[in-house]
Image (tube, rainbow, N blue to C red):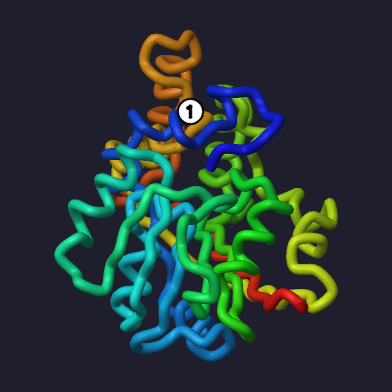
Amino acid sequence: MPTAGKEPGRFDSLRRFSDRVQDYVRYRPSYPAAALGWLRERGGLGPGTPVADVGAGTGIFSRLLLEAGARVFAVEPNDAMRAAAEAQLGGNAAFLSSAGTAEATGLPAGGVALVTCAQAFHWFEPARARAEFRRILAPGGACALLWNTSVRGGAFAEGYEEIKARFGTDFKEIRHEELEAGGRMAAFYGPAGYEKRLFPNAQALDRDGLRGRLLSSSYAPKAGHPNHAPMLAALDALFARCQAGGRVAMEYQTEVYLGRFSS
């Protein structure tokens, strides 16, 4: 999502993911069934629920919402990512795609019971997104923010983090982990507060899958950048050291924040 006051090209997701779509579709992890179960239990997700999936990207989370029976309004400003979602999910009558942003979704007031933002909220301008989400949510509606966060510990996980930090173009600047510690999550949800749950998640990746997973990240230098070839060489060496049976395990915690905005 475009974010006011930040350097164009580095932080503007209207552009920075456009040439990473195929890697994103093939190699980004999905989300665990337990996380969807918690949204059914606490967030009102269910058959026929109107949900705004904001920053829907290539439709990874939208697909899960559809499988849960929801009517999904997928909002995504990046043309290439939105086209990928539409190609995969457009045949489902419960999937409606549009080119809005978190700060201006284009959806009608009070039209959804749940807003979801999977791997996207750190691109938003929080105050404006909050105002927009309050506008589109029906009374009592909820907002869920989700991330797949890499689990630290072990030779592979530590080596992968070191590669991202060493070769990534702006890895530290776009990490979402400081949102909660810095009080921005509390400010976003407001006095009503929020709940947080963690769910285990994982991918098993071969060498090409590991390469694709890293190259799907916006901070991974592209071909032609001086860090690109050294990064892939370091990644291949890490894979060779840590693989078992031709694969490595990429472990995550799926973080889910859920709250309702006070009136």
Q: Is residue 155 above or below residue 62?
A: above
Residue 144 percent location from the top left of the image:
58, 70
Secondary structure of the residue carrying tag 1 is loop
Q: Is residue 229 above or below residue 18?
A: above
Q: Residue at x 30, y 64 (%)?
A: 96
Inspect this view and state whether residue 75 appears: yes
Residue closer to the observer: 251 or 58: 58
Q: Is residue 72 above or below residue 120?
A: below
| Left or right side of 254 for 97 | left
Q: Residue at x 84, y 51 (%)?
A: 182
Residue 202 is drawn in which quadrant? bottom left
| Left or right side of 193 for 44 | left
Residue closer to the observer: 198 or 166: 198
Inspect this view and state whether residue 248 appears: no
Q: Residue flagged by tag 1: what amino acid is it?
A: Ala
Residue annotated with mark 1: 220
Q: Residue at x 34, y 76 (%)?
A: 71
Residue 68 is drawn in which quadrant? bottom left
Residue closer to the observer: 115 or 155: 115
| Left or right side of 6 for 75 | left
Q: Which residue ends up furthest to the front in the rendered image?
A: 108
How would you rate the neighbour count of disc 1 (Cα within 10 Å): few for under 14, some for 14-19, many for 20 or more? many
Residue 180 is drawn in which quadrant? bottom right
Residue 168 percent location from the top left of the image:
56, 26
Q: Is residue 95 above or below residue 50?
A: above
How many numbered discs? 1
Residue 153 percent location from the top left of the image:
63, 52
Q: Residue at x 56, y 44 (%)?
A: 155
Q: Which quadrant would the C terminus be assigned to in this image?
A: bottom right
Residue 113 percent location from the top left of the image:
51, 80
